Amino acid sequence: MHAAPYYLFEYASEAHVRALAPVFSAMEANVVATAPAAADSAFDVASRWFGPCSGINEDPVTGSAHCTLAPYWFERLGKTELLARQVSKRGGTLHLALAEDGERLLISGPAALYMEGVISLPPVG
């Protein structure tokens, strides 16, 4: 099994990203769509993630997509911290910051617990 192609498309405005209506059955790649956030917004950037090639038409909040978006927008905006808004139907907010070592991305934001569990490993030896 091979990984699906993945594309990043930058749009002129958050309104364009919000208005996207993909035909998922026709898509041959997963896509992150992004734009600068609206001028009257508290956010720096807006995005949506479409992954029909991975079995998820649209993910409401996608941390992994922001691992691609953060360096892209850090460079474009000349920043090392961003407040991002994924503008899916449910939506979500992510705070993105370049770690002090300059190599890692720190992602934080509000979250909801949806499952708890215990992982038991067999004894070694």
Image (spheres, rainbow, N blue to C red):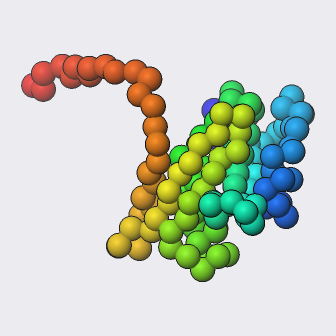
Quadrant housing residue 35: bottom right
Q: Name, please, the residue furthest toward the bottom.
A: 78
Q: Residue at x 65, y 47 (%)?
A: 86
**Would you place residue 62 above or below residue 73 in this image?**
above
Looking at the rendered structure, the number of numbered marks drawn on it comes to 0
**Would you place residue 123 above or below residue 83 in this image?**
above
Q: Residue at x 50, y 56 (%)?
A: 95
Residue 55 in percent (x, y) is at 69, 27
Answer yes or no: is residue 4 visible.
no
Q: Residue at x 71, y 39 (%)?
A: 88
Q: Name, please, the residue furthest toward the front.
A: 40
Q: Horizontal placement of 40 versus 113: left or right?
A: right
Residue 73 in percent (x, y) is at 64, 68
Q: Quadrant of the C terminus?
A: top left
Q: Residue at x 18, y 19 (%)?
A: 122
Answer yes or no: is residue 12 visible.
yes
Q: Nearer the viewer, residue 85 or 26?
A: 85
Q: Horizontal placement of 94 versus 76: left or right?
A: left
Quadrant housing residue 53: top right
